[in-house]
Amino acid sequence: MRVVFSQRLSGGFKKIVPEMSILFLIILSVQPQSVLGNSVISPFLCLSAVFYWSLHRQGHLYVVTLIILGIISDILIGASLGFTPILFLTVFAISSWQKKNVLLKPFYLIWGVFSLISGLAFVIAWAITFFVSLQYADIGPFAIQYFMTVISFPILDWLLSHIQRAVAV
């Protein structure tokens, strides 16, 4: 009886590893990093995780879960509700659509595809900010956050791939 319960608990945990890793990276992204002096801009790490799990666990990552995680992110960063879910769903939709073309390619091509998709997400983020505030939004912070996100992608890809192998997701 204990073995069956333990196996079910372990199986349940393995199913939520992608969501938990995205949640962890949302929380980590909220913490300002002083990489550029007194900068309070940090990489949008959870975008990398959404891209990674969209490629590797497409059938198990649900739109509703991404919306909930995006709303949690919006609450933590103080953004308008729906801002981050739009970005998550954009990355999820494009990476799921291009999964067959991307998955078995060399890493530098996957990184390039992530750079393009996240670039689109940051342009959408800038446009939403522009239209919600009804005034010009400075592109500088978005560009810095974009480059920090793209630069951090190899480390997160490596980490998430090791997590995936460790729990055999």
Image (cartoon, rainbow, N blue to C red):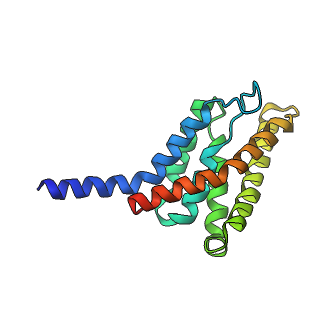
In the rendered image, residue 150, in percent from the top left (x then y), is placed at: 72, 50
In the rendered image, residue 2, in percent from the top left (x then y), is placed at: 13, 53
Which image quadrant: the C terminus? bottom left
147 relative position to 52: left or right:
right
Q: Quadrant of residue 101?
A: bottom right
Which residue occupies 77% across, 32% down? 36
135 relative position to 1: left or right:
right
Q: Nearer the viewer, residue 87 or 43?
A: 43
121 relative position to 85: left or right:
right
Q: Is residue 94 above or below residue 87?
A: below
Q: Nearer the viewer, residue 14 or 152?
A: 152
Which image quadrant: the N terminus? bottom left
151 relative position to 99: left or right:
right
Which residue occupies 85% across, 39% down? 139
Q: Nearer the viewer, residue 58 or 105?
A: 105
Q: Does residue 169 appear in this view?
A: yes
Q: Does residue 68 appear in this view?
A: no
